[in-house]
Image (cartoon, grey):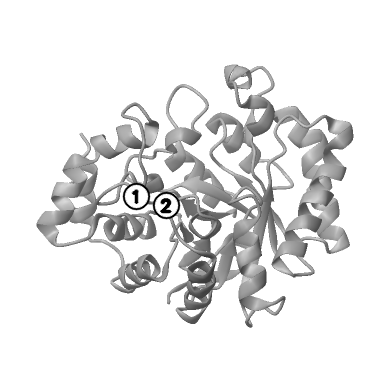
Amino acid sequence: MEQRNLGPFGPVSALTLGGGGIGHLWGKTTREECVATVKAAVDGGITLLDMAPRYGDGEAESVIGEAFGGNLPAGVRVTTKCLLGGTPPAEIEARLRSSIATSLKLMKLEKVDLFFLHSNVAPDDHPMRGHPDAALRVTPYSVFCEHVRPLFEAFVAEGLIGAWGLTGIGQPDAIIKLLGESPAPAAVQAISNPIDSPGALKFYDGPTKQREVIATAKANGVGVLGIKAVQAGALSAELDRPLPDDHPEMLDYKRAAGWRKLALEIGEDPADLAHRYALTMDGVDTVVLGVKNRRELDMALAAEARGPLDPDLVRRIDASFD
C-alpha cells in the first residue's frame, strides 16, 4: 500500500482503519468478524488504527485489545479521542486522563500515539453553542486555547501520548484559526467527500469550508486524515440501515443519485469510487475507513490499489452533484 506523510506524525498507510464500523455504528456485524477485519487490515498494509470511546461505547477499542492482546504489529500505531463538550475547566484534566486511561485499558496498550479532541470547537459566542447537543459536543474556542491545548502539550511531554490532533468538523472559521496558531496540532480530521458534507454531524449554518480546512492544514505542516469519504453510507450504492426521509444522511443519499448513475456508467462501486475520490483529494494524507467486515475492507483495499482518479473523472464527479 502507498505510504504518505501525516505531517510531523510521519509516514502512514494511505488508508487508515477507523473504529466506526468495528464499533457497530454503520450496520450489523459481530465481534468475531470485527476482530478478523482488524487483523486483515493490518495484513493488507494498513498501519494506522483510528479509534474513539464513542465508537460503540468502547466496543471498537475492545476489538483492538482482543485482536492484538496488547502487542501491536511492528509499525502499527493507534489513535483515540475524547469528547469533552462543555466540561467545566476545573474538570477537564481529570476527564482527559480518565478517557485516555480507559482507552488504553480496553486496547491493552501503554501509550496513545495520536490523541484527538473529539469535540466541535466553536467561537465562544457562536450560535452553535445553543444547539441541543452543545453541552456534549461543543467546546468553546477560549476553553480549548486556555485549558485543553496546554494539557495536550503536557501529555506529550510526559509521554502519555505521542502527539495530539483536532477533529476538523467544528465551526470552520475556528478550526482554520487553530490550525494557524502555535502550538499547532500534529493532525486534523477533515471531511473528504465530493459534497464536503459531514451529514448529521454539522451543528452550524453556512458552508463547511472543508477544502479550506485541508489547505490551511497543509500550509501549516499539519497532517490530514480524510474522514466520512462515503458520508456514513450516503455515497454508497445503498444505505445499510433505515433512516427517516429527512435525516441528513438520507438527504445526501438522494442528492447523490447522479453520483450513483455515474459510478454505474464507469463500472465502479459507488463506495469504491468515494474512497478513490478522497485518496485523490489534494492535501489528504490518509483516508479513514468505516468498514465493518472483511468484504467491505477488501473492496477498499482493492480501490486504493487502483490508484488516484483521472482529473477529467474528478470533474465529472463534481458536476454530477450540480
Q: Secondary structure at mark 1?
A: loop
Name the outermost residue toward the left: 265
- Side of 143 where 132 appears, left or right: left
> Which of the labelled discs sits on residue 240, or is there none?
1
- Side of 230 where 157 appears, left or right: right
Q: Position of residue 153 (x, y in %)?
A: 81, 51
In the rendered image, the vertical position of residue 135 relative to residue 278, given as above or below: above
Depth check: 1 or 263 in front?
263
Q: Which residue is mark 2?
A: 27
Q: Position of residue 286 (x, y in %)?
A: 48, 61
Residue 257 occupies which quadrant of the picture? top left
How dense is the environment of label 1, judged by Cα within 10 Å: few (below 14), some, or many (20 and up)? few
How dense is the environment of label 2, judged by Cα within 10 Å: few (below 14), some, or many (20 and up)? some
In the rendered image, the vertical position of residue 259 relative to residue 201, given as above or below: below
Q: Secondary structure at mark 2?
A: loop
Q: Position of residue 230 (x, y in %)?
A: 36, 50
